[in-house]
Amino acid sequence: MKTGLKVTGIVVVVVVVAFAALVSLTIGWRPFIGPKARPLTSRTFERTPERLARGQYLTENVLACFDCHAERDWTQDDAPLTPGTKGGGTANFPLLGLPGKIHPPNISPDKETGAGTWTDDMFARAIREGIGHDGRALFNFMPYERFRHLSDEDLASVVAYVRSLPPVQHVVPKTELIFPVKYLINAVPEPLTGPVPPPDLSTPAKRGEYLLQSSVCRDCHTPQVKGQALKGLDLAGGFVLQGPWGTVASANITPDPSGIGYYDEPLFIQVMRTGHVRARKLKQIMPWPIFRGMTDEDLQAIFAYLKTVPPIKHRVDNTEPSAPCRICGFSHGSGDRN
């Protein structure tokens, strides 16, 4: 009997060790012990007129912060911002298919329902490193992985501007992620250990690369499965987005003829300003009402960068019937022509 118990004990130990080794080799322990996070600092960002102006431009026209952190009327063609909700978050985010109930929080300076008690460094750490004011890992629908490259000065400008907004008293429920995402997300945040210098703006294409990354274009225009971008389809479209606007697949914006190879600079700017590709109207999930506020120089730079990315043949046409696509694995218009 004692021998049997001893053997059982050995088996249990072996199973536990094997399980621990499997976890360590696959997902690691981070999902269970919490995200990597640097300690908060006492740094503050001076609210200079230059920073406030730059922060407003970035927040409202480039980073598209109020596409999520405000209420919008998604039933209208340009999904206008509901007056008085800027920075107040939303309790009813409209995108379907997310892993749980996603509620972009109230980041206005309201002390009771918003971020009025947050420090500048809490904002900074959340925006670029994915750690909330309370130390939790943020779901990476908040594009902190894209914002990591924001220069220190642009980050300071964004924080200064957001903290200058009028307070919005609006209670927003906490995000509730489903299992196992609620644990796996702990492996995503990465602390920044050094300064992020100003971007290289020496050519229009380099300027455009910085702006395209800041505008989070890849998160929609590159198809992804379970949050992972599909290799070989950078900016090639086909990612299906469902919501009040219906079902729509993101466009191929590479310079291939099946993408935007036929665009010239005036057409690109027209699309970004009006939400129309000539006679065809874009769905409101494409945040052209936000991006139309960019300067001509910045829109020209983004187009210059897009002309340098590798062309990818991938037909995506939302005016055609939806069909399975062998390239991206989604079902979208003209999918059967790929």
Image: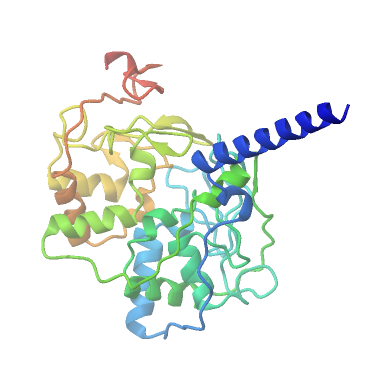
Q: What residue do we see at 39% from left, 22% from top?
A: 329
Give residue 310's position: percent from left, percent from top.
Answer: 17, 37
Q: Nearer the viewer, residue 316 or 197?
A: 197
Task: Locate the N terminus by quadrant.
Answer: top right
Q: Among all residues in the image, which is located at the extreme right?
A: 1
Q: Nearer the viewer, residue 109 or 121?
A: 121
The number of callouts visible is 0
Q: Which image quadrant for residue 51? A: bottom left
Q: What residue do we see at 27% from left, 14% from top?
A: 337
Task: Locate the C terminus by quadrant.
Answer: top left
Q: Is residue 315 above or below residue 337?
A: below
Q: Among all residues in the image, which is located at the extreme front?
A: 3
| Image colouring | rainbow
Q: As drawn, is 141 to the left or to the right of 101?
A: left
Q: Nearer the viewer, residue 200 or 13?
A: 13
Whether residue 259 is visible here, answered yes or no, is yes
Give residue 277's position: percent from left, percent from top.
Answer: 25, 37
Q: As drawn, is 224 to the left or to the right of 34?
A: left
Q: Is residue 293 above or below residue 276?
A: below
Q: Which image quadrant for residue 333? A: top left
Whether residue 296 is visible here, answered yes or no, is no
Give residue 328's position: percent from left, percent from top.
Answer: 35, 25
Give residue 14's position: percent from left, percent from top.
Answer: 66, 34
Q: What residue do we see at 72% from left, 34% from top?
A: 10
Q: Is residue 269 above or below residue 156?
A: above
Q: What residue do we see at 17% from left, 61% from top?
A: 297
Q: Which image quadrant for residue 259? A: top left
